[in-house]
Image (cartoon, rainbow, N blue to C red):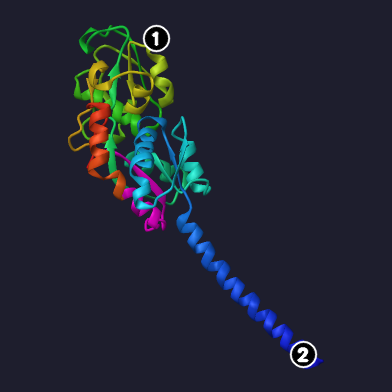
């Protein structure tokens, strides 16, 4: 009886061991086959990723789930909390500020596209016509506010202190001949501010979302040459070699995606590869 019981227990243990091995193998496979969940700004990131999903992903055996966000804060928090596998909405200077402020352990992949920052107005037709003491709205996050001030300085609207660089703040304004008043707003709110400002400096994605055409409507537009503000995919550090991310990077940097960007955005969004 004891022998029978021992044999039965041993057999059961063997079955359980095999089942556990089988279960682990199945889990690994399902993880590799699972949809890659990517957080995006709707325009142009979501549109570019939707093109990849609808036209290119199946050939690579890649399943994509696209999650849209309408601000610049939630996508990084969701990535940290493992609600996303990656996000695609930001540039390296913004990512660096976020990592410094919030301690994120993230890695940026290769640049995909640039959305030139633009100066827009409903009140004036050119920058020279901006009246004395006018209100100018700029983004309130440090990387994009510095970017906006540099754009205005490059067009002669203000002058910045020597060496201010990409981290320029309002304290770095050395000369403001028209005594402009700078108002910092969340980036998503900038297109709505146009009724109340003489000028608003708007991120490219929010300009397009507001039915503005940067290449046509902007009074001044950022140059793409040697521009550090290209947008890219960001992942948790250590996930860079996830086969699904490797496939996504290949597709996002393909000739097909470059052509899609050129055809759809006609200079309002520029491929960065």
Indicate left or right for 76 with 9 as reference: left
Identity of the residue furthest to the left in this view:
225
Badge 2 density bin: few <14, some 14–19, many ≥20, Cα 10 Å: few
Magenta range is: 228-249
Residue 154 drawn in magenta: no
Please identify the quarter of the rendering in which residue 173 is found: top left
Identity of the residue furthest to the right in this view:
1
Q: Which mark is residue 195?
A: 1
Badge 1 density bin: few <14, some 14–19, many ≥20, Cα 10 Å: few
Q: Which residue is located at x 38 percent, y 23 percent?
A: 209
Vertical side of 153 occupied by 165: above or below: below
156 or 217, which is in the foreground?
217
Instruction: Find disc 2 in the rendering and name its residue.
Output: 4
64 or 4, which is in the foreground?
4
Vertical side of 32 occupied by 226: above or below: above
Q: Secondary structure at mark 1?
A: helix
Quadrant of the drawing holding the N terminus? bottom right
Q: Are marks 2 and 1 in contact (CB under 8 Å)?
A: no
Q: Which residue is located at x 25 percent, y 40 percent?
A: 256
Q: CA distance from mark 2 to mark 1?
A: 86 Å
267 or 51, which is in the foreground?
51
**Whether residue 164 can be seen here:** no
124 or 47, which is in the foreground?
47
Q: Which mark is residue 258?
A: none
**Whether residue 243 can be seen here:** yes
Vertical side of 243 occupied by 75: above or below: above
- Looking at the image, is mark 2 or mark 1 earlier in the sequence? 2
Could you tell me residue 116's position as x and y percent? 26, 28
Quadrant of the drawing holding the C terminus? top left
Please tell me whether mark 2 or mark 1 is closer to you in this view. 2
Could you tell me residue 244's position as x and y percent? 40, 53
Could you tell me residue 31's position as x and y percent? 49, 57
């Amino acid at each position: 009886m004891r022998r029978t019981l021992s044999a039965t227990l041993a057999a059961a243990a063997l079955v359980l061991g095999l089942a556990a091995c089988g279960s682990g193998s199945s889990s690994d496979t399902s993880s590799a086959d699972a949809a890659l969940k990517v957080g995006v700004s709707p325009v142009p990131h979501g549109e570019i990723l939707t093109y990849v999903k609808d036209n290119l992903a199946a050939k690579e055996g890649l399943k994509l789930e696209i999650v849209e966000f309408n601000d610049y804060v939630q996508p990084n928090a969701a990535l940290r909390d493992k609600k996303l596998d990656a996000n695609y909405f930001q540039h390296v200077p913004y990512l660096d500020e976020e990592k410094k402020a919030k301690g994120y352990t993230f890695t940026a992949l290769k640049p995909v596209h640039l959305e030139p920052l633009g100066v827009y107005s409903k009140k004036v037709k050119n920058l020279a016509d901006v009246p004395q003491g006018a209100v100018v709205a700029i983004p309130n996050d440090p990387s994009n506010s510095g970017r906006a001030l540099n754009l205005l300085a490059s067009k002669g609207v203000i002058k910045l202190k020597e060496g201010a660089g990409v981290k320029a703040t309002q304290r770095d304004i050395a000369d403001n001949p028209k005594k402009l008043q700078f108002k910092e707003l969340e980036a998503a709110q900038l297109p709505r501010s146009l009724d109340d400002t003489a000028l608003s400096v708007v991120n490219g994605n929010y300009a397009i979302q507001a039915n503005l055409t940067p290449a046509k409507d902007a009074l001044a537009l950022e140059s793409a040459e040697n521009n550090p503000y290209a947008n890219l995919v960001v992942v948790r550090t250590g996930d860079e070699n996830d086969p699904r991310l490797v496939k996504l990077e290949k597709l996002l940097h393909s000739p097909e995606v470059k052509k899609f960007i050129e055809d759809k955005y006609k200079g309002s969004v520029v491929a960065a590869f």
